[in-house]
Image (cartoon, grey):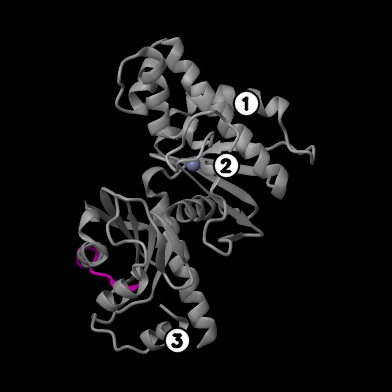
Amino acid sequence: MTVTDQEQMAVTPDARPPGASQGIVGIDIGGTKIAGLLVDESGTIVTRASVAAPASEGGDAMADAAATLVRDLVARASARLVAVGVGAAGVVDHATGTIRAASATFVGWAGFPLADALSSRLSVPVSVENDVNAFLLGEVAADRRADDVLGVMLGTGVGGAVIIDGRLRHGPHGAAGEIGHTPGYSDLVCTCGQVGHLETLASGTSIARRYSERVGDAVEDARTVAERARSGDPIAVEVFASAGRAVALACASAATLLDLPRAIVGGGVSEAWDLLAPAIEQTLRTDSPVSGLPLVIAPARLGADAVALGAIEAARRILVTAGERS
Ligand SMILES: [Zn+2]
């Protein structure tokens, strides 16, 4: 939605009883699940819920499901909804809240005006960020350190985000920080069709696939590989070491290019930090930024809540901007 719309929203009569506490809802829209949580004015999580994502049914079905989830959270918290923040999979035009591009899982998602669709359903300002950008905003807000930091999300794929001078950098196409699709890490074909990207070694899908190729036995997910590594399977240990080394090299390249002192690594694969950390530390000993200052690569702290909490942070920022303009 545009700022003009937000200003109009600000004078919309409020149907909720006076005295109800203000709530902001953050939602994390993925290919299988829409997860949401409501925070009060102090930022405390009051309630949370999730629903299945009807990703194959089109943008309006997704917006309906998300809006129903928001209404449910607001009713449970007896709160007065003031804004909604969304972290959504896909390339997002954050200025308009429209999805620019998305994977094939999402039918009718590319081009869908998600912020407008949700704000017309819920009558509040809605901000939409890419989910990895939201993840990094959430982690940085939790740290209370709005500095220069790289975010890397090791999930089904590998996503990235960059905050410089305390601000998310989106780039002219909303694709800044997409570190998963930087080349030079292997000779394997990536999900995007190109060769050698970071994602071919470091995503959950790739970790399962690389291990399965080596042992000749189809393993379903990275979690199973992690369990085997912890019980002493040397091939499983090596697959995680390859992932850790590739992540560290990617972080070192980004840190050198942008003078970033810190990288935060999240997503499901980062739960196996014990298996990634040795290779990360070893790599940083030989491949460090030219600044001479040590690069810190740390695991994310908020777990599955990071995207929704970061989306709330983005929503707060549009409320502040709207307030300053009125
Ligand atoms: Zn790729």
Answer left or right for 65 relative to 197: left
Q: Which mark is residue 4?
A: 3
Residue 31 in the image, given as x and y percentages of width and height: 29, 50
Mark 1 = which residue?
281
> Which circle, 1 or 2, is nearer the viewer?
2
Q: Which residues are magenta?
A: 73-83
Q: Earlier in the sequence, mark 2 or mark 3?
A: 3
Amino acid identity at mark 3 = Thr
> How far is disc 3 from disc 1 in space, using C-alphas?
49 Å
Residue toward you, 195 or 302: 195
Q: Is 272 a magenta residue?
A: no
Q: CA distance from mark 2 to mark 3?
A: 38 Å
Q: CA distance from mark 1 to mark 2?
A: 21 Å
Task: Check if mark 2's residue and mark 3's residue have beta carbons within 8 Å.
Answer: no
| Residue of label 2 | 182
Q: Give coordinates of residue 71: x percent, y percent.
A: 22, 68
What amino acid type should be assigned to the residue bearing mark 2?
A: Thr
Q: Is residue 114 above or below residue 213?
A: below
Left or right, 65 with respect to 39, comes to left
Q: Is residue 43 visible?
A: no
Residue 93 point in image, percent of width and height: 46, 66
